Image (spheres, grey):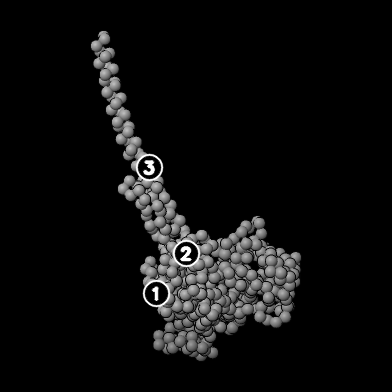
Amino acid sequence: MGPFWRHFHRRAGQEAGTVLVVVCVAMVAMIGATALAVDVGRVANNNRTLQAQADEIAMDAGRALNGQTAAQLSGATGAVTVAVQNSATRNNVPFSKLTVDLGTLSGTTFTTIASPIVNGAIQTVSATTVPKAVRVTAGGTVNFLFDMSKPHGSKTTNRSAIATMDNYGGFSIGSWLASISGGNNSVLGGLFGDAFHLNVVSYNGLVNGNVTLQALGLNMPASVGVLSPTQLLNTSVSINDFMLASIAALNAQGNTAAVNVLNSMLVNASATGMVKLGDFITVAAGGENAAAAASLNVLQLLTASAMVLEKNGGHALSIPTATISIPGITSITASATVIEPPQFYFGPVGGSVSTAQVRLSINPVINIGAGSGTTACTGALSGLLGLLSCVLYALSGMAVGVNLHGSLPIDVTAAGATGTLSAVNCATPGITVGSTTQAVNLNDAANLALDL
């Protein structure tokens, strides 16, 4: 037994020495991997920081694009240069690490017009082209804490962000009852009375009450909750809640005259109707910010809302359906929509909306018959149908009765108009809206049959 145990102890001692060597080698590798991971992590973190800085400064520089040329935007006092300097200071970014390019963006391709700032140095720019995009590049260097080959190694990286500017504008087209002078107009009073069940219809004081979609959304009652401008356009809210939000927004402006009118409306109204502003406000893709900040007249919004409610109710400010009696025609029904809701547009150049001010619908139901045989030829002819019956009798010797029946619906749209945003000038703020008018548009769909 003695020799066996001596042999076992020798084997155990040899293996212990081998494990120690393996552990030492592994520790060296682990330390190296850990050092590499630390340095790689610091580089990755630096890249994230640079990207955030580039994004923020690019957004600030993009807001400075105002339709001026690259030369006007550059230089020590140029709007882009000043915006980049202020943003760099505000975000604690070394100005010397920034490069700024002005240009245009098509898809994902950025085309440089000029570089007003290169590594913090302000350049002289003479380009007279108007840039629509700005690219900001932020650079930074990470000094390695661990580097086996270079004790003082480093890694320099940069990240870029591009901000674009496009021209957006807004306009409205339609007939505004609000333009009628006086506070007790019978047409507007009738509209508000029908749609909102108002007993008091005076709107004096509302003509100068303006709010934004953003303010309306922020001041919605607690039962509705705060709505973004996009949510507000796509959410049906009660007229009561709309009025409450308008009152809060106007109160913040100190517009007591408009607030008093709306409070009077609330007291005397049973405003249970629901309205969605998106039914008459069109916002094109990219025009959300323009729509959110646009100043909208409360009276115009209320008028358009009332028209939508009336239209949905089936009698949108219409002349009641009338029946006209004409000999030989069973019936003729006619109704006229006096006015349609005005339309709003917010978005880029080229967008358009249409509205028609008067729409007349006529639907005659025809059932005209003529006698047959000798009666048709010797009696009083019923116009062309009687003549046709007589001719058929003469040709065939048979009594032929003729009957024309069916319908001839006619839809006439008058005073139609389409407004198109033609141009937006941001340098000297202003927009151009082109309009196309349409005097009369006639649509008919005849459904007539002749029986013999």
Three-letter code, disc 3: Thr
Residue sitting at 71 percent across and 79 percent down? 185
Three-letter code, disc 1: Ile
Toward which corner of the image does residue 270 lie, by quadrant? bottom right
Residue sitting at 48 percent across and 69 percent down? 62
Q: Is there any visible trace of residue 310 in the rendered image?
A: no
Name the front one of labels 1 and 2.
Answer: 2
SS state under label 1: strand
Q: Position of residue 265 (x, y in %)?
A: 72, 68
Three-letter code, disc 2: Phe
Q: Is residue 158 above or below residue 371?
A: above
Q: Position of residue 318 (x, y in %)?
A: 62, 76
SS state under label 2: helix
Mark 1 near mark 2, Cβ–Cβ under 8 Å? no
Q: Is residue 402 above or below residue 209?
A: below
Q: Position of residue 203 (x, y in %)?
A: 71, 74
Q: Which residue is mark 2?
A: 95
